[in-house]
Image (tube, grey):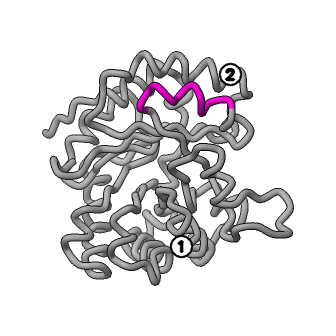
Amino acid sequence: MHSKRKPVIAGNWKMFNTTSEAATLVNELSSLVARFNDREIVVCPPFTALAAVRPILDETGIKLGAQNVHWEEKGAFTGEISPAMLKDAGCDYVILGHSERRQFFAETDENVNRKLKSVLKAGLIPIVCVGESLSEREAGITSTVVSRQIKIGLDGIDAESAKKIIIAYEPIWAIGTGRTASAADANAVCAFIRLTLTGMLGTPVADAIRIQYGGSVKPDNVDELMGSSDIDGALVGGASLKADDFGRIVGFTATSK
């Protein structure tokens, strides 16, 4: 974590929590994280809970995010939600290209790129997920996969807009499996992502972009992860559903070995 980049901790609730459960969770969470104003805190409930959560967040400093979006502003796209609708619901952030979207819903790098342009135009902050599968890691092609996802995903984005983007490195083999990339491994890929961004956008922009790590982030590994030079935050899955765990992750103390 670099001192000039503001850390950002985001909780991806996935397909969990009814409106009442969501309200209970953010109420519990708000008291645990109220004192942290030197880091951005985001929760990403399911679409159905956005309206229930938003007013509770008003006084807390916690920001609201969504888990997905469509690239068109409106139209005949049954079951989809536009960037304008997310803004209207009070969202500031949106997750794009999560591996579960890629794996189960045929999301492609090209789709991510279309969504990214639409989201930036609407004034939302995108969290763009990239990461390799276990077979890709074992084949030694992590850098090939991740650079392709970055290059296609961010194609045609100008430097000024790019500064607003958050990249989340999520090795697919570490999501929900209990396996975490070691802090050294995670940081190496995040540093490689920054190098890729430098080649595309130049050093000042690449240095401004925040790169999160996601993949079984827990209270007992967050301090070491956040102590790494190129990890500027965490995209948290399962642990974000427990107020105490997520509160502890938000309250990380960066330690470097």
Query: Is-magenta flag for residue 60?
Result: yes
Query: On the picture, is 248 further left or further right than 230?
Result: right
Q: Quadrant of the C terminus?
A: top left
> Which residues make up the magenta segment?
52-61
* Closer-to-camera residue (202/242): 202
Q: Residue 126: percent from the left, percent from the top?
A: 49, 59
Q: Residue at the spot x=32%, y=81% of the render?
A: 200
Query: On the picture, is 198 further left or further right than 178?
Result: left
Reply above or below: 143 against 175.
below
Query: On the picture, is 255 further left or further right than 13?
Result: left
Q: Residue 86: percent from the left, percent from the top?
A: 64, 51
Is disc 1 surrounded by few (<14), some (14 to 19) or many (20+) residues within 10 Å? Answer: some
* Residue 59 seen anywhere in this rendered image of the structure: yes
* Residue 129 seen anywhere in this rendered image of the structure: no
Under mark 2, the amino acid is Glu
Query: Is-magenta flag for residue 55?
Result: yes
Q: Residue 2: percent from the left, percent from the top?
A: 18, 50
Q: Residue at the spot x=86%, y=69% of the render?
A: 76
Q: Label 1: which residue?
A: 117
Reply above or below: 1 against 75.
above
Q: Residue at the spot x=51%, y=30% of the render?
A: 58
Q: What's the CA distance linking mark 1 and mark 2?
A: 33 Å
Q: Label 2: which residue?
A: 21
SS majority, magenta: helix
